[in-house]
Image (tube, rainbow, N blue to C red):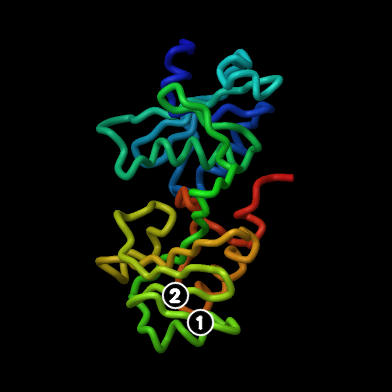
Amino acid sequence: MAKRRLRTGPTAALPAKPSQSELLRIVRLADPDARADGDDVVAVDVRVHAPVEAEPELVGGELEKVWACRVTAEGPMPFDFFDRHLAEGIAFRLGGLAVCRGEVTDPADRGEADRGGPAVILPVRPAADELLPLLDGEVVEQEEEFVYTVDGVRVLVVPEKGRPPAVQELLPFATELTAIELRGDDPAQLGALALRLADALNGLVVDRWRFRVDAAEDVLPPA
């Protein structure tokens, strides 16, 4: 695959070559209907190309060995940057880096301005008196309507933009989805809170790239 295309991306640059079964398992967290197609994996209208060995210069020498999985649209441009989110989510789970438009980023790096956490996707917007008892913190402060702070975590109840494939099972019961977005410094704390809220409100937890989360440790980078 041409080096220029890998740099343009979106591309997941990985330190080790993943098997197709492992790649398919991860992609199915973002789209349960993802399937193998030859050596590639196809999700919605996006193709994750089989990994190819690339030069370390692709990621500025940040990795000693690089296996690159390029993500391309099968038709029109993917909705809500699904291709870029897919590349970043794959890189996060496999300890790699993401390349898009020549820029190399580490999805596991949570800088001062980037403290986004998981979200709970719900088919019905919860009322304040339904949500507040579930936050279970020493002090719950209401900043404005449907924006709360509890034990250092910001909780925002907002309309969910688009329809992430990972939560398709909720859609037969809802025309518009709601997201409880969590923001904070401790990913493990955010993951545990998200799972608790999802269990109580019959929702599903997704990470910042809209991959499904089933355990608190799923929001942590690999050891």
Specify few, some or many for label 1: CA neighbours under 10 Å numbering under 14, 14-19, or 20 or more.
some
Front-most of 167 and 35?
167
**Left/right of residue 188 with respect to residue 177 in the rendered view:** right
> What's under tag 2, amino acid-wise?
Tyr
State if disc 2 and disc 1 touch (CB < 8 Å).
yes
Tell me residue 55's x, y (percent): 61, 13
Does residue 38 appear anywhere in the picture?
Answer: no
Specify few, some or many for label 2: CA neighbours under 10 Å numbering under 14, 14-19, or 20 or more.
some
**Left/right of residue 71 with respect to residue 63 in the rendered view:** left
Tell me residue 181's x, y (percent): 44, 64
Q: Residue at 51% of width from left, 82% of height from top?
A: 140
Residue 186's place in the image compared with 42, above or below, is below
> Closer to the N terminus: mark 1 or mark 2?
1
Q: Residue at 59% of width from left, 61% of height from top?
A: 214
What label sits on residue 140 in the rendered view? Answer: 1
Question: Dot 1 lies on which element?
Answer: strand
Residue, far top: 2
Q: Quadrant of residue 219?
A: bottom right
For the C terminus, which image quadrant? top right
Alpha carbons under labels 1 and 2: distance apart: 7 Å
Tell me residue 170's x, y (percent): 38, 66
Question: Dot 2 lies on which element?
Answer: strand
Residue holding disc 2:
148
> What's under tag 1, amino acid-wise?
Val
Q: Residue at 67% of width from left, 27% of height from top?
A: 15
Residue 158's place in the image compared with 81, above or below, is below
Residue, far right: 223
What label sits on residue 3 in the rendered view? Answer: none
